[in-house]
Image: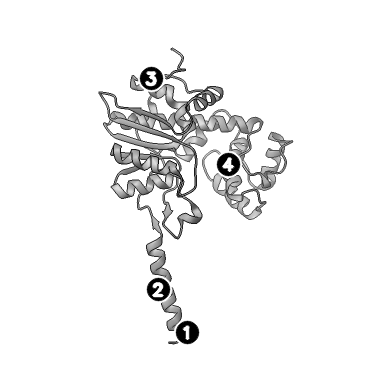
């Protein structure tokens, strides 16, 4: 057998292994749930704040699950997960068992990612976070899949109502950079992400280069060290305020989407980090006519 034939055989074998061991979701969730009713829907109660969230989590622990089956609407199973990564995490078995018993008509998860890979060649290295697992279940049962995230441009627009463009740009840039760089300074990655995260209305001229990012960082976090080697999203000063405001903007969008789908009669199965369910619980209970939570204030 010639070298060419050997190379061809090896390529075919690898291709078969890859095809059998890697799967990608054909379902690309939309970047935003489009509904005029959802966008204008008023929430009848405030969210829990930080200390109230911590007290509820300490009382119940994870998972934090809110279920609703109102008489005049669809049904909701809102699963608040801890963010795991391992493919053998028992939380995934819990999600699967609840999914199989619930038989949803629509599934929702965090993230704007349109494709998720899994399989025996991928999962041991990439793990199986909850959004990927929701993709797997939705694909298996041919259930409509929707992202719970607002459109990036909409989230930016909301934050620009309270914060300066360079502050918003730095926040969104570092939110991704700290995750992808993993504590290792990477100028090439930083330049690429800065360009991508500021390519949106309101931010295009906010931080034209890394020198501008350095200047804004020095102003907002003078004692926080070098952002290039940060291992997590910085939560200092204005950046902490931005993080809280972003979480609230995302949470309002999530709650509105859930309520709109319920009004359409859908059986909704949504999986997010437990903090979102905990913070939104009072508003969702009030909107759905459910009994108040144990700590829910009146009014």
Which of disc 2 and disc 3 is earlier in sequence? 2
**Tag 4 residue:** 175
- The residue carrying mark 2 is 12
Q: CA distance from mark 2 to mark 4?
A: 40 Å
Q: How far apart are labels 3 and 1 at the CA level?
A: 71 Å
- Determine which quarter of the picture holds residue 73: top left
Q: Which is more N-terminal, label 1 or label 3? A: 1
Quarter occupied by residue 237: top right
Instruction: Kindly identify the residue that appears in the image at 54 percent across and 38 percent down.
Output: 202
Q: Determine whether the residue tagged by mark 4 lies in a helix, strand or loop.
A: helix
From mark 3 to mark 2, how far is it between C-alphas? Answer: 58 Å
Residue 111 seen by the camera:
yes
The answer to whether mark 3 and mark 2 are in CB contact below 8 A is no
Of callouts 2 and 4, which one flags the residue occurring earlier in the amino acid sequence? 2
**Which mark is first along the chain, 2 or 1?**
1
- Please say if the residues under marks 3 and 1 sit with CB atoms less than 8 Å apart: no
Circle 4 packing at 10 Å, graded few (<14), some (14-19), many (20+), is some
Q: Position of residue 299 (x, y in %)?
A: 43, 12
Between residue 85 and residue 12, name the one nearer to us. 85
Identify the residue under disc 1: 3
Q: Residue at x 30, y 41 (%)?
A: 100
């Amino acid at each position: 057998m010639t070298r060419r034939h050997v190379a061809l055989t090896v390529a075919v074998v690898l291709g078969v292994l890859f095809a059998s061991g890697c799967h990608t979701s054909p379902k690309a969730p939309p970047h935003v749930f489009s509904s005029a009713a959802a966008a204008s829907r008023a929430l009848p109660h405030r969210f829990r704040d930080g200390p109230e969230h911590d007290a509820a989590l300490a009382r119940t622990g994870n998972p934090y699950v809110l279920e609703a089956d109102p008489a005049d609407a669809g049904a909701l199973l809102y699963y608040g997960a801890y963010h795991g990564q391992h493919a053998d995490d028992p939380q995934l078995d819990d999600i699967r068992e609840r999914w199989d018993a619930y038989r949803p008509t629509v599934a929702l998860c965090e993230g704007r990612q349109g494709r998720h890979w899994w399989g025996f060649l991928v999962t041991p290295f990439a793990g199986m976070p909850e959004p990927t697992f929701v993709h797997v279940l939705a694909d298996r049962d041919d259930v409509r899949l929707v992202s719970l995230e607002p459109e990036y441009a909409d989230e930016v627009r909301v934050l620009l109502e309270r914060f300066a463009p360079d502050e918003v740009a730095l926040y969104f840039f570092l939110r991704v950079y700290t995750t992808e760089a993993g504590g290792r300074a990477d100028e090439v990655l930083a330049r690429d992400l800065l360009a991508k995260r500021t390519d949106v209305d309101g931010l295009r001229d906010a931080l034209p280069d890394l020198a501008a990012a350095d200047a804004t960082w020095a102003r907002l976090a003078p004692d926080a060290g070098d952002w290039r080697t940060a291992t997590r999203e910085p939560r200092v000063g204005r950046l902490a305020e931005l993080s809280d405001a972003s979480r609230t903007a995302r949470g309002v969008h999530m709650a509105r989407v859930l309520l709109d789908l319920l009004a359409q009669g859908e059986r909704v199965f949504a999986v997010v980090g437990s903090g979102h369910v905990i913070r939104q619980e009072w508003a969702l209970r009030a909107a759905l006519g459910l009994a108040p939570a144990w700590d829910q204030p009146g009014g």
